[in-house]
Image: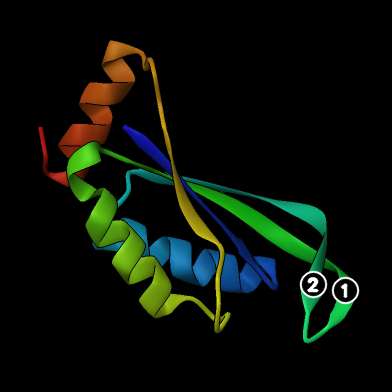
Amino acid sequence: MKLVYSTFPSMEEAKNVGLKLVEERLCGCYNCWHIESAYWWEGKIVTDEEVACVFKTPDEKQEQLIKKLAEFHPYSEPAIFSIPVEKVSPGYEKWLKDVTGTG
């Protein structure tokens, strides 16, 4: 299982992308929350409110998920990265594989 992380400019845009990824069965679930970000952009430090999301996906769907996430993403250079999960409860892992068609 992998957690794929990304940030979005608003909750509405995060939900739009997240629902597409769930509908395409590239992830079983996503979670989003509001964050405060600071980053370099066009030679200046910018602070902004964003929405962070994690998408829960089986190993077999990781590459497809990242590709589609980049395609659907509203940012021109989105932060998208994958975090390996060391342990997961057996029941959740089975559910995730079942709903994504990898079980």
Q: How many marks?
A: 2
Dot 2, crowdedness within 10 Å: few (<14), some or many (≥20)? few
Would you say the residues marked 1 and 2 are in contact, meaning their CB atoms lie under 8 Å apart? Answer: yes
Q: Which mark is residue 22?
A: none
Q: Nearer the viewer, residue 81 or 30?
A: 81
Secondary structure beneath label 2: strand
What residue is disc 1 on?
Answer: 46
Horizontal arrangement in the rendering, residue 62 relative to residue 102 (left or right): right
Q: Residue at x 42, y 63 (%)?
A: 19
Disc 1 versus disc 2: distance between alpha carbons? 6 Å
Q: Residue at x 69, y 60 (%)?
A: 51
Horizontal arrangement in the rendering, residue 9 relative to residue 67 (left or right): right
> Could you tell me residue 65's position as x and y percent?
30, 58
Horizontal arrangement in the rendering, residue 66 relative to residue 54 (left or right): left
> Could you tell me residue 67's position as x and y percent?
30, 68
What residue is disc 2 on?
Answer: 40
Given the image, on which type of amino acid does mark 2 rest?
Answer: Trp
Q: Residue at x 35, y 61 (%)?
A: 66
> Could you tell me residue 80's position as x and y percent?
49, 59
**Farthest front residue?**
43
Would residue 25 be visible to someone looking at this image?
no
Which label sits in the foreground, 1 or 2? Answer: 2
Dot 1, crowdedness within 10 Å: few (<14), some or many (≥20)? few
Secondary structure beneath label 1: strand
On the image, which quarter does residue 41 sit in?
bottom right
Horizontal arrangement in the rendering, residue 90 relative to residue 13 (left or right): left
On the image, which quarter does residue 8 sit in?
bottom right
Q: Residue at x 55, y 77 (%)?
A: 77
Depicted 88 relative to depicted 8: above or below: above
Depicted 67 relative to depicted 65: above or below: below
Given the image, on which type of amino acid does mark 1 rest?
Answer: Val
On the image, which quarter does residue 37 sit in?
bottom right
